[in-house]
């Protein structure tokens, strides 16, 4: 297949682009970033620097491709999506509306969209011992962020294009994908990368600050596992949104403890209750994806976080030496 990965200089996009190339597909990447800003060396056919908020750029990028993986988004971790609303909705709506229309006009055979666990209603995520989120819980809708509302809008946009124009769609709701070669500093990083960086930066015997009281829970999926799931979903005939995540709940405190253990340092934890912590608990229900794709996560937190920590610690060391 000739595949386009948008957001292909980003964390998931860059891993996915190389993965598809290794599977024998011809891969083109489009991103507003330049290749030098991409952490992972890309082994793809073509890289286009393009602002996909603009229709002309989407039109150019989607010519002569069979599959589109639309991962481009203006996004970040809890700090970023709590603070930035208008820009996130504006940019991502433009990207997704224009990508969808360009795919239709250029006769793209199948389009994949990276939705998010952030579409799920806040009222189902009020305790740390939260019930795993089933796909059907998306409505009645009450996402806790503008970012989540935009993802929900785009899911509906895709449904409309599928119904009215017969566009072939695949939708994944990612639940906290983590791993090496992703954003780990600058304010857009997510909890696992942020904690790895804090632990890597501090000297033995020092302290790190955790946002909130640390009792909030999440589940995290290692990048390699997510790639297998995306690929299986794209090859399947499932046109309904599917959770791609882990169902192993862990508190942010436990996550920090594990990273500290992996680092081999002795580190104290402090808590900043004024910082945003998002919903109180969030977990993925994987029953649907298990039955439809026969997929489940393989990588343990210890394995995934060891690889992630090793890379981030290396980046921090290199940064300190400069
Ligand atoms: N990482 C996660 O845990 C997670 C969870 C849920 C959903 N998602 C979704 O998965 C996708 C990939 O996430 P990620 O973690 O790799 O994020 P990322 O920020 O690393 O990658 C997004 C990429 O999109 C690019 N981009 C932004 N605006 C653009 C524009 N106007 N034109 C072209 N490219 C643009 C960015 O430069 C970046 O490289 C996003 O759609 C995100 O919302 C990710």
Image (spheres, rainbow, N blue to C red):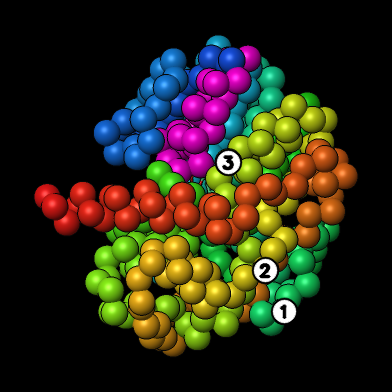
Name the residue located 69 percent from the left edge and 49 percent from the top edge. 297
Disc 2 crowd rating (10 Å Cα; few below 14, some 14-19, many 20+) is: some
Crowding at dot 3, Cα within 10 Å, few <14 / some 14-19 / many 20+, comes out as some
Q: Position of residue 59 (x, y in %)?
A: 49, 22
User: Which numbered disc covers residue 249?
Assistant: 2
Q: Quadrant of the N terminus?
A: top right
Residue lying at 66% horizontally and 36% vertically, measured from the top left: 228
Toward the right, the furthest residue is: 291
Q: CA distance from mark 3 to mark 1?
A: 27 Å
Q: Nearer the viewer, residue 87 or 205?
A: 205
- Give the magenta-colored segment's residue range: 1-23
Q: Is residue 130 left or right of residue 22?
A: right
Quarter of image, res 275: bottom left
- Disc 1, SS: loop
Q: Position of residue 5 (x, y in %)?
A: 52, 29
Q: Is residue 112 magenta?
A: no
Residue at screen point 69% across, 63% down: 248
Do the residues bearing badges 1 and 2 touch, measured as CB atoms within 8 Å?
A: yes
Residue at which label 1 appears: 129
Report which quarter residue 209 is drawn in: bottom left
- Identify residue for label 3: 224
């Amino acid at each position: 297949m000739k595949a386009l990965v948008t957001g292909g200089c980003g964390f998931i996009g860059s891993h996915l682009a190389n993965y598809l190339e290794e599977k024998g597909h011809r891969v083109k990447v489009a991103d507003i970033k330049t290749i030098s800003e991409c952490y992972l060396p890309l082994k793809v056919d073509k890289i286009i620097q393009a602002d996909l908020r603009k229709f002309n750029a989407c039109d150019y990028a989607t010519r002569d491709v069979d599959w589109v993986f639309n991962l481009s988004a203006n996004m970040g971790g809890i700090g970023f999506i709590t603070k930035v609303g208008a820009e996130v909705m504006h940019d991502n709506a433009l990207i997704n509306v224009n990508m969808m229309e360009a795919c239709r006009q250029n006769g793209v055979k199948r389009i994949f969209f990276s939705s998010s666990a952030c579409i799920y209603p806040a009222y189902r995520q009020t305790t740390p011992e939260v019930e795993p989120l089933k796909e059907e819980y998306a409505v009645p809708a009450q996402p806790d962020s503008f970012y989540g509302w935009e993802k929900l809008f785009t899911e509906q946009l895709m449904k409309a294009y599928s119904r009215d124009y017969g566009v072939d769609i695949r939708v994944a709701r990612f639940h906290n994908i983590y791993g090496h070669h992703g954003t780990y500093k600058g304010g857009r990083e997510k909890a696992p990368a942020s904690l790895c960086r804090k632990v890597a930066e501090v000297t033995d015997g020092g302290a790190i600050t955790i946002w909130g009281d640390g009792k909030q829970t999440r589940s995290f999926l290692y990048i390699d596992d997510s790639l297998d799931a995306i690929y299986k979903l794209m090859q399947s005939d499932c046109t309904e949104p599917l959770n791609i995540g882990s169902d192993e709940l862990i508190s942010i405190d436990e996550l920090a403890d594990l990273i500290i253990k992996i680092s081999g340092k002795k580190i104290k934890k402090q808590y900043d209750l004024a910082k945003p912590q998002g919903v109180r608990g969030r977990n993925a229900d994987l029953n649907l994806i298990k039955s439809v794709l026969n997929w489940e996560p393989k990588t343990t937190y210890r394995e995934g976080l060891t690889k992630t920590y090793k890379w981030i610690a290396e980046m921090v060391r290199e940064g300190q030496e400069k």
